[in-house]
Amino acid sequence: MSGSIRKLLAGALATGWMAAALPVFAQTSLLNVSYDVARDFYRDYNPLFQKYWKEKTGAPIEIKQSHAGSSKQVRAVADGLEADVVTMNQASDVDFLADKGLVARDYATKFPDNASPYTSTMVFIVRKGNPKGLRDWPDLVEPGVQVILPHPKNTGNGRYSYLAAWGYALRQPGGNDGTALEFVGKLLKNAPLFASGGRDATTTFMQRKIGDVLVSFESEAELIAREFGKGEFDVIYPSLSILAEFPVAIVEKVVNKKGTRKEAQAYLEHLWSKDGQENAAQNYLRPRDAGVREKYAAQFPPIRTFSVDEVFGGWSRAFPAHFKDGGSFDQIYQSK
Amino acid sequence: MSHVVARRANTEPRWLRLTLTAVGLGFLFLFLAVPLVAVLFQGFAKGWRAYLDGLAHPDALHAIGLTMFIAAVALPFNIAFGVAASWAVSKFDFRGKSLLITLIDLPFAISPVVAGLIFLLIFGAQGLFGPWLAEHDVKIVFALPGMIIVTLFVTFPFVARELIPLMQAQGKDEEEAAVSLGASGWQMFFRVTLPNIRWGLLYGVILANARAMGEFGAVSVVSGHIRGETNTLPLHVEIVYNEYNVVGAFAAASVLALLALVTLALKTLVEWKMRQEIREQRAELPPERTE
């Protein structure tokens, strides 16, 4: 018996050695730390960039991806996850890394378009045939309408939904912070629950069939169609919504250490190339390039939008005013 | 003693016994069998091909390999530490012994997420040793070493917990006899101690293995979720599920469930062997040792 246990141990150790010997450290590799739902985009984009880089320099390059909730991801980068680049869905997450000295303070000016290679906006997803006749934001605050959205305090998707409604109310005749607070308060009262993330909200609405309307990114609507079928729901564009930007940045500390600045720079720049922009459009993210936008116009109905910078003076102001402890979200909840 | 219990059990009316049995079995069915079947059902919802595609994806294959590798590295350490700790606790008397036993149990009491965060606080970039590690280019968290360390941490008690009561019950007479007959330390260990504890040891290893492969929370904190590099099977299941790839997620989950079933089968076998052995021992032992 003792012999067979020893054999077992030896076997386990041998397996371990073999597996440990397997990884090969030959080519340059970049680690792109990204938010939860960007997987499809970068799965398509990475081969495009690898091909481009090979043609340009003759050298192969490996791209590794990490995806999870955006706030968790930037935390991990701050704690030592060696990302060469971060590609996020909200400036506040990249700002956090700038505060930690990992990303340049002026990262937004290092690339065109506010360092956001594509945009999206918040739309309504309603049940087939729109039985409750929901057309615009005011319809969502009517009594008896159930609205599904992720938690506004700790999810990117939820924050964009919240600010979209707030901005809409502000832009109405006579709108001010007081009327906006009241409007958003009514909207939140119509939420039977807060989902823990964008994907969870979708599952709640589509699979568990809770709610009359799901507020989510335009790009999510397409993914829902792929998974649940096109005929299951309608997409409604409100009269005014928010411009969601997806900032990218180089993690200075890591590229300096690894000596990958050139590659990281090219990787992010290539997002603005024709290929990169087409890839965005194919993933239902609105491209910045006018030509590409023209080509995919059918897929992106015109919608009036405002940016977080225009209405809220940037995420660095919007975040504490609305989502930090004591912000407008907490005020609504304390009075509820 | 035993016949008293038996008679009391028999006095319960038949309908009550049947109801209790039905409730117990119904509960087992609802909470164990149904979810297990649901996992397989969801995995095969789009047919064999989709199921196999989900498993054959490079990321899924890598996750399976990584999970087994981490378990394979963690288990020998667990065996060594577990045997050493239970040896010390059961064969010797020393100060701070109860403290040691409490420490061994600590990973059971701590939530896995907290366990992960502890190692982040120690080895993370902003942690205790973070700056030093970065200077010397040693990667612990968000890399394989960190994932092995947290797995070791959460699985540490299983072997020791299994062996301590067993070795305490066996006492140290046989070892003393071996030594007095001239056995060296290793001879005594391999010829006397190990054969005595082998089933208990195996049982602990099986439980530790199940936990090592299934661990989610602690590993999630220190993994960094790099696909094809630091994504274990449980993490892979969550990510794929969140990508609306239900078939892929449940295909991967079914592998985990399969591992669990194999574990259960092994566990039952080992338990059966252990009982048999104890019975034989009882039969062989002189009367004063049977208590």
Image: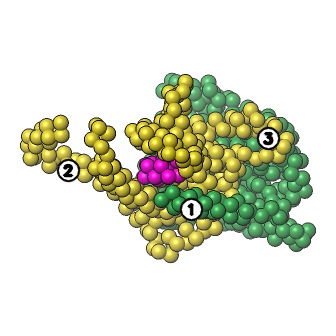
Chain colours: A green, B yellow
Q: Is residue A245 left or right of residue B74?
A: right
Circle 2 — which element?
A: helix
Magenta region, mostly helix, strand or loop?
helix
Circle 3 — which element?
A: helix
Do the residues at pointers 1 and 2 share their chain? no
Occupied quadrant, residue A207: bottom left
Residue type for callout 2: Ala
For the question of whether residue B136 can be seen, the reply is: yes
Please determine whether, in this image, residue A202 is positioned above or below residue B40: above
Q: Which residue is mark 2?
A: B22
Q: In which chain is the residue bearing label 1? A: A
Residue drawn at x 82%, y 46% is: B137
Q: Which residue is mark 3?
A: B133
Estimate the x, y position of residue A275 in percent, counting from the top left.
79, 67
Q: Is residue B173 left or right of residue A43?
A: left
Estimate the x, y position of residue A326 in percent, counting from the top left.
62, 24
Residue drawn at x 69%, y 49% is: B145
